[in-house]
Amino acid sequence: DTGVSQDPRHKITKRGQNVTFRCDPISEHNRLYWYRQTLGQGPEFLTYFQNEAQLEKSRLLSDRFSAERPKGSFSTLEIQRTEQGDSAMYLCASSFPGIGNTIYFGEGSWLTVV
Amino acid sequence: QQQVKQSPQSLIVQKGGISIINCAYENTAFDYFPWYQQFPGKGPALLIAIRPDVSEKKEGRFTISFNKSAKQFSLHIMDSQPGDSATYFCAARPYTGGFKTIFGAGTRLFVKA
């Protein structure tokens, strides 16, 4: 399968703990995005990479959130000192510059903070 | 500020009927409008997309209608099937030079058998 891969798919953590999610984009895609989705809402943009460069971060991405894409391939999203409000599905997507620059999503990583 | 407004929030349609979901946008820099379909527990999947240089695009049972002057676009699902039951999101993005796709809040569609 050559789609966007995310790991883990589900994570339950205690408030205050750190969590890290990994995303492997479609191999020829040089653009990678992180979105967050809560129940009943559409995905909300968090951050965007072109190759290894992080080009934009949303105001939704507080100082407790950090994303990296060290070699321009896979990416990680770390949440430090998790809060209950961080409970959501974290979606990774990738795209290739071209017609429409359509983004393709992975299946998401569900985070529950208890 | 919600840049893409989607309605209705939920929709129930009989099998074989037409499902219609509407969206409106504000930012005139948007000129690429995809629709995504999402099943429970899955990520959104691209369904169909349109640029505003055409007023309509059809792929199988799915049609996008676009009204540039009104800044509105809609998804029509013809001959709706129970397997179409999902959440549908409209979205918008600048076609070139932009990267941030903005999503509507979603429409939960249920097709009754």
Image (spheres, coloured by chain):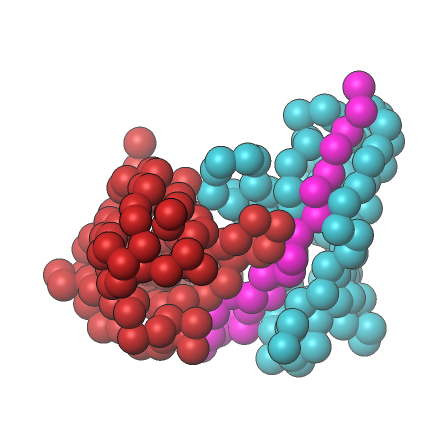
Q: Is residue A60 above or below residue A32?
A: below
Q: In this rendering, would B38 be left or right of B18?
A: left
Range covered by the magenta-colored residues: B89-113
Residue B6 quadrant:
bottom right
Residue A49 visible somewhere in the drawing: no
| Rendered residue at 70%/71% (across/down) | B25
Q: In this rendering, would B39 be left or right of B54?
A: left
| Rendered residue at 28%/69% (across/down) | A64
Q: Colour of chain B?
A: cyan
Q: Is residue B9 above or below residue A48?
A: above
Q: Colour of chain A?
A: red
Q: Nearer the viewer, residue A19 or B82?
A: A19
| Rendered residue at 66%/52% (across/down) | B106
Position of the N terminus of chain B, as image quadrant, is: bottom right
Residue B76, magenta (yes or no)? no
Q: Position of residue A21 (x, y in %)?
A: 26, 50
